[in-house]
Image: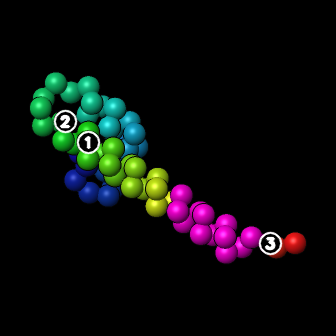
Amino acid sequence: MTASFTEAATVMPAQVFTWSGEPDRAFVEKTAGGILVLLAVLISLNAFAVLLRKKFERRW
């Protein structure tokens, strides 16, 4: 886990994959939380793209 924004970090899917392989029980919650964060970001970006498409769609 990084302590500040200036430290090296990894992408979230790779971090979730790393957490899922850990034998410690505490990583189960971290893995589930990471998956929920990724799903929330995916759904919100998709909804934003749909709204933009509807707004800028050309009608013929």
What number is the disc on residue 28? 2
In terms of depth relative to the viewer, which is nearer, 20 or 51?
A: 51
Asked if the residues shown at circle 1 and circle 2 are in contact, with their CB atoms under 8 angstroms apart, the answer is yes
Queried whether the magenta region covers residue 50, the answer comes back as: yes
Residue wearing tag 3: 58
Residue 28 visible in the displayed image? yes
In the picture as drawn, the residue positioned furthest to the right comes out as 60
Disc 3 versus disc 2: nearer the observer: 3
Residue wearing tag 1: 32
Queried whether the magenta region covers residue 49, the answer comes back as: yes
Give me the C-alpha separation between circle 3 and circle 2: 47 Å
What is the crowding at mark 3: few (fewer than 14 residues within 10 Å), some, or many (at least 20)?
few
Three-letter residue code for mark 3: Arg
Give me the C-alpha separation between circle 3 and circle 1: 41 Å
* Left or right of residue 54: residue 34: left
Report the residue at 39% width, 49% height from top. 38
Q: Where is residue 31 shown, x and y percent of the image?
A: 26, 39
Q: Where is residue 30 shown, x and y percent of the image?
A: 22, 42
Residue 8 visible in the displayed image? no
Three-letter residue code for mark 2: Val
Magenta region: 46-58
